[in-house]
Amino acid sequence: MTASHAPPDPRITPSAGPPRLDATDRRTGVAAGRVLAAGALGLLLAIMLNSQQLLREAQQKPFGWERDASVAVWEPVEGTSSAVGLHLPRLWADEALGHSVTDPGATTDPFASAVVGDAAGDAAVADSTPTGVVVADTPATGPVGTNSGDTPALADQTTGAEATVGGTIGTELTAGDEQPALGTLGDTATSAPPTSVPWFPTPADPLQLSIMGDSMVQFFGKTMVGLANDTGVIDASTEHELASGLSRPDFYDWPTRIVEVMAGEDPDAVVLMFGGNDAQAIVVDGQIARRFSESWLQEYSARVGHIMDLVTTDPERILIWVGQPIMEDPEYDSRMQRVNEVFAAEAAERDRVHYVEIRDLFRGPNGTFSRYVADADGQLTDVRLTDGVHLSTIGGRWLSEVLLDQLGLVVDLTSGAPS
């Protein structure tokens, strides 16, 4: 018999190895049901800890059935969490980190009490306008056009007929019209004539410029800050809040923020740009007003006017309000034209508010939207992002140059500029 077939020698101890398992072997472990229960408990705890934020996010949705359903789900959850104090750890953490803390049950509208005193406030501001400050009014003419519908960019679940008011501001280019070159629009896109003011910024005493607004500011604000600071006589700053505007102060409270900036930084000039997120239903006297309905137009106009008044409360401060550019989606573009008309009309009623229309600045070769627009040398340049809404880096520079030109029409920016 060969060695390979020899029986094992019982004197040899088998090598150590893993123990053998049999049907009677039992090991301790965690049952799948207990794992699932622990996971569910953890999820429930996370929901309770963050209940206020979840309810706030639901409340900030566009008005409609989806918002109603979300609020109906999260309100009782938040109520239960607050009743037993489970929301407090998140609240304490936010306060410790310096994050804003908002009570989701608070329904105070910063515009509601503010617009009541606007009429008297306007008179006081007008009376205090210093001699030498030229008023740049933008004439509002004709009826506002008809809104053509919704686009995914600004979904609004409200439906129904929309009120028609007003006319078109400015002259539209059509196919075949000669396109203005960059550098020629600073004078024609606004109504402010060349002028001087009673103060002249210098390197030692620079003009304080604040640039604020929605996501459009994100794409030109820093560029404008750089160009402004390069003049040597401007000290500029910028801030923006994505998806914000004037229609939903429950999402972001611009009136309060603007008051803070005016009081804290005391800028000499302010550039504001809103509107991209504003063509949606808003709350008026506790009721939802459909976009561009009569009540909507009245309320939105009052809100725009109130923001203008907040900035120009200081009789020596200048406000440049930037309109929305031409948009790729025709329906969205129609809505932006209508909010632009509100801006122009409100600016026309106020001293030291200069409305800047920029639609022509970003028209393509055929007079319509185009990502590529001819520069001063006639070369096509990519000035818009692929979303058909925001400005590219070059587009942001173009707009910044136009706005600085506009500022130069009402403030002498050369008196102390370095040679």
Image (cartoon, helix red, strand yellow):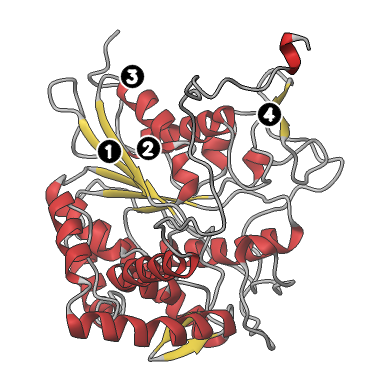
CB of mark 2 within 8 Å of CB of mark 1? yes
Point out the frontmost of discs 4 and 2: 4
Q: Which mark is residue 382?
A: 4
Earlier sequence position, callout 2 versus callout 3: 3
Estimate the x, y position of residue 344 in percent, counting from the top left: 50, 61
- Measured from the top left, where is residue 259 in percent x and y? 20, 59
Query: How busy is the neighbourhood of tag 1: few (under 14 within 10 Å), some, or many (20 plus)?
Result: many
- Residue 79 image offset from top left, x and y in percent: 28, 86
Quadrant of the image occupied by residue 387: top right
Q: CA distance from mark 3 to mark 4?
A: 24 Å
| SS state under label 1 | strand
Badge 3 marks a residue whose secondary structure is helix
Check disc 2 and report the residue beneath it: 407
From the viewer's perspective, is residue 221 above or below residue 281? Answer: above
Depth check: 250 or 13 in front?
13
The amino acid type found where label 1 is placed reads Leu
User: Relative to 239, is 371 on the left or the right?
Assistant: right
Tell me the residue that label 3 is attached to.
230
- Give the residue at mark 1: 209
Residue 232, quarter of the rendered image? top left
Give yes or no for contact between labels 2 and 3 (Cβ–Cβ under 8 Å): no
Label 4 vs label 2: CA separation? 25 Å
Sequence order check: which comes first, mark 3 or mark 4? 3
**Callout 2 crowding tier (Cα within 10 Å): few <14, some 14–19, many ≥20:** many
Q: Nearer the viewer, residue 91 or 348?
A: 91
- Residue 54 lies left or right of residue 229; in this view the side is right
Residue 349 shows in the view: yes
